[in-house]
Structure formats: C-alpha cells, structure tokens
Amino acid sequence: MNARELKDKYVKFFESKDHQEIPSASLVPENDPTTLFISAGMHPLVPYLLGQPHPLGVRLVDVQKCVRTGDIDDVGDTYHHTFFEMLGNWSLGDYFKETMIPWSFEFLTKELGVDPSHLHVTVFAGDGDAPCDNDSAKIWQSVGIPENRIHFLPKEDNWWGPAGSTGPCGPDSEMFIDTQPELPEVEFKLGCKQARYIEIWNDVFMQYNKQADGSFQLLDKANVDTGFGVERNTAILSGFNDNYMSSIWQPIIKKIEELSGAKYSSPDKVENDVSDENLRKIFTNRSIRIIADHLRSAVFIIADGVEPSNKERGYVLRRLIRRAIRQGKLLGIDTNFTSQIAQAVIDNQDNYAGIYPELNDNLQKILTTLDSEESKFRKTLNNGLREIQKLIDRNKSVSGREAFTLYESFGFPVEMIQEELSKNNLTLDINEFNQARDEHIEKSRTLSAGKFKSGLADHSEIMVKYHTATHLLHTALRQVLGDHVQQSGSNITSERLRFDFSHPDKLSDDQIQQVQDIVNQQIKLAQPVSVASMKFTEAQASGALAFFGAKYPEVVTVYTVGAGDNFFSREVCTGPHVQNTSELGLFEIQKEESAGSGKRRIYAVLK
C-alpha cells in the first residue's frame, strides 16, 4: 500500500462516520507564535480543542504537514524524520472512548487487514492526578484484544498534555503492532525500546483541564484527538522495517543513487554485519537517508514561505540544507544537486504530486532557493578548510570543542575534520567533540520543547490583545503602502508583537507614523470585533483577507473589526480576539527592519 492509498482510506473511513475533511494548515503556525513549525496534527486545532466552535462542526479528519526540529540529529536511522504527514480525526465534545476505540480496531483490522492477534495496546495506569483508565481497557477487551495484550503504563507513556502549564489534557491509548509475530512471544516493550513492537496509532482522550494550582478537573465536554503517522504506517503495511524502503522515499533515493553512484542497501542485509564492507554500507545508508529526509523537509518549508537565514525558521531550513549537502559531499557529489532531489520529491506520484498545490505553485522558488543556498555553502566549506588550517598553525592541534564549533559554524562533518587533522599527523578527541555536540542537542531540544509547550494554551488577555492588534496593523500597512502587502508571519509574546509582511523597501519615518496613527485611531473609535462562520468563497467575496497557507476548508471563521459595510478589517482567522478595540490601549511601533528578500518586519507594543 502506498501513502496516497493509505491517506485516502483513512479520510474516507472517517467521512463514512460523518467527519468533515479539513485541509492541512501551513507549516508556519498562524496563531501560535511560540513555536517555529506545526509539529503535531492537533496543533492547528488548539482553539477548537479549547472550546471555540469549528465552522465545519464537531467531527473532523485531516492529513496535516508537520516538522519536528528536535529530531534533526537523530535522522539517519530507519525511522526518524523531520518532516512528516500525520493523519488525525477529532471529536470536539461529541463521541468519546466507547466510540473511538471500536473505530480504531475496525479501521486497523477491516480496512487495513491487520491481524488482530498482532496488536498490543497500552492504557493509562493511573496516579494521584487521575484514576486508572479501566474504561479503555474494558472497551479494548470488548472488541477482541485479550487482557494479556493490554498494558497499563504511567503518565510518561500514556498521557497527553496539557500543551502549556495549564489546559486540556488526558489519558491516551496507543496501538502497537508485533512486527515479528512468527517468533515466540517476549515481554512487551515500547517501540523505540524494542523494535519488535511498533506504535502505529494514538487515541488521546482529553477529559481533564489542568489548573494553575496543579489540580485536574473534568472538562464539561471531552474531546478525542488522534495521530496516525503516514511514513511509519506505510512502511509497516508494506512489510518493511525501514521506513525508507517504502514508495514515499524510493523515488528520492533512486535520484540520490543516480547522482552519487552509491547504492542504498536493505538494512536486513547490512545492519548486523560488522565487516568493513558492510560498515561502509551502513554509513552510506545513513548519508542517503539524511539527504532524502532533509531535502524533502526543505521543499515543504520553502513552499510555505520560509527562506534560509540565521534566525529561527530560516536557521532550521539552512541547517537542513547544509546537513544534506555535507552528506552529499561524503557520497562524492561535488556539484550542486539539491534542486534535482527537490524535483524528485515534487514529482512523487505515489504521494505528493497533485496533493499539495503549493509545491507546484512555488516550484521555481524552491529550486532557485536550494541552488543559491548550496552555492553559498560550498564556498563556506572552503572557508572552513582555511579555519582548520589556522587552528592547526596556531595551536598545533584542534580540540574537540573547537572541532564542534567548526562543525556547527561551517557545516564541517566530523569525518572531514579528522581527515584534515590526519594530514598533519594529529588526532581528534572524539569524546570531547561528542560531549559538545550532545550539549548542543539537549539545548536545542529544550528550546524546541519549550517553544511548543509554552504557547498553545496561552489565550491570556495580553496575548489576545496583541493578536487583535496584528489585524489592525495588517490593514493599516495595506492602506499606507498598498494592497501588495500580505502578512507572512507573526510572533507574539506578553511584551510585544512582531509582524512580518511583504514589501520591498524600508519604511520611512513618515510611513511608520501614518501606520501607527491609523491603528490608534481605530482603537480610539472603540470599534466592535465580531466573528462569523461562512463559506470560504463568501469570505473572499466579502473582502476578508486570507494569506496564511495554501488551502482553506469550505467553511471558515472570519473576524471583522468595525460595523456594517464600512468595516476596517476583515480576515479569515481562528482567533481569539478582544470584543472591542478600546480594550487595546495605546499602540506604538518600536522598530522596523528587513525580514529577508522582499519582506519587512515591525515590532510594536501596547501601552
């Protein structure tokens, strides 16, 4: 089964259960400025999980694009990815465990043909915050999973959330498949701890609300949030224990093989053999996986409007591209190749071609961006060689930490550093290098986790005010600079807002003052802020702006500032917003600067 078939089966199954399909949101979060990328299927739906009505109802299904930056350094094995697609279905206060668990069992066994005897499930074991989830265990037994294949695990394994320090959360029930059922049974262990049992689906039952004092209260309406990974399940259903053997990856890998002359080997044939020849195959496999994964991620990130830079999303994109180029160099690719791999991603008929219009709409931008970044980096590599020689000439050695700095700053693979040192009869303290790398990875993961954790449930009063202010700022910019202005991103903290928009030139002091005055005039007028649900075509016809992402559902939520036909601002948005602009206070622009080619950035505060 290929990925396209799997996604189609999933969506149609839940459509038969009265779910409405919603399109994938952009990888760039629209209303969560505290995280760099959409990193989970539930991420774009947080406002609705917190209680805001969804315009398409209480039963939803989707295929969501995701990027997880914390996994970059783990890519190279058979199952880690930075970009991935997540299938999910949602109940917003409608059905619950007694409905979702039988549906999960039905989809796996009837639609996908999974042998029920190969399934294991886990449920929450209970603690001082919430009781043991015996309800889920009983439901699993009622559909045919025997008691000895139902495993009770603690909160660290079977509990989701809250997304922030407070908010919706609850126990989850995970489904695992035995990938070696022909062997004698062994003790069940989680997927990454024992490769035999692999997690394939997760049903989250959001029935609690964590309070500021740390207590858990039952929600008035409980939600269901599920996650079914496309890459992992496509591989498993195709009989592979290596995700990269599936049709999602093979067209990309074939192109890498063509350009490098290297060959990708089935891990069954090489992973357990430690001969020199097979060790070379293992390293080759790792390089090919990194190139395939990172350039696929880069394609989708660029398609959603991100450009390489040294900050935030742009830095992640640049790092992905450079890691891919480094691995290409290890495989002997000495000329620009990234745009050719990108074309193989976009042309993949088994998965992406025709599904994501943003890929074809931005094709030239994707290819040009990659080619330009690759040319810059190849020059940087040459600079790195000179830096290594400077260190050798000055210190007669290169420490492990200095080597890591070269690795991070110039994109130098450790193997290349060791090679340069060996030319000078020097060796690298690899333990010190690994320690510096591990410290960096931990710091990156903490930052990534903190960004994701801190903002999803933060609908505090000041954040809501700043979110509303971005709408006023957007319209004011269009009035002063022209209709070519389109929002390209925002970042909101409790201290200020940051707003990125399309415009080629630096704003003059007079233009900045005009924009600021327009926003403050709307605040002084005490304009009402109203919300309505309508068809997307009607929203556009009514003058609503909609610039985030490439797709919108048939029915959308629209926020309007001002009354009647002479409204000031109208945008497709998930909210939340204040009820009247008079709540905002005084708006002040503090800084205006470049945000990349053809983009500007404004920092502003409310006083």
Image: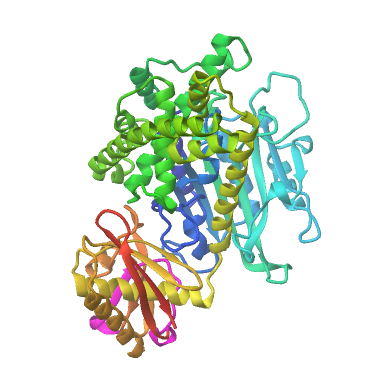
Magenta-colored span: 563-584
**Residue at the image position 71 percent from the left and 42 percent from the top:** 122
Residue 477 appears in the picture as rendered: yes
| Residue 530 vertical placement versus 325 (above, below) | below
**Residue at the image position 43 percent from the left and 69 percent from the top:** 575
**Residue at the image position 49 percent from the left and 40 percent from the top:** 408
> Which residue of the protein is positioned furthest toward the front in this rendering?
394
Q: Is residue 367 magenta?
A: no
Q: Nearer the viewer, residue 499 or 381?
A: 381
**Residue at the image position 65 percent from the left and 43 percent from the top:** 174
| Residue 173 vertical placement versus 322 (above, below) | below
- In the picture, the quarter occupied by the C terminus is bottom left
Is 76 on the left-hand or right-hand side of 222?
left
Residue 25 image point, x, y percent: 40, 53
Which image quadrant for residue 553? Answer: bottom left
Residue 111 image point, x, y percent: 52, 35
Q: Nearer the viewer, residue 61 or 128?
A: 128
Q: Nearer the viewer, residue 549 or 477?
A: 477
| Residue 433 vertical placement versus 463 (above, below) | above
| Residue 392 vertical placement versus 7 (above, below) | above
Residue 3 image point, x, y percent: 43, 33
Which color scheme is applied? rainbow
Residue 294 appears in the picture as rendered: no
Residue 422 image point, x, y percent: 53, 20
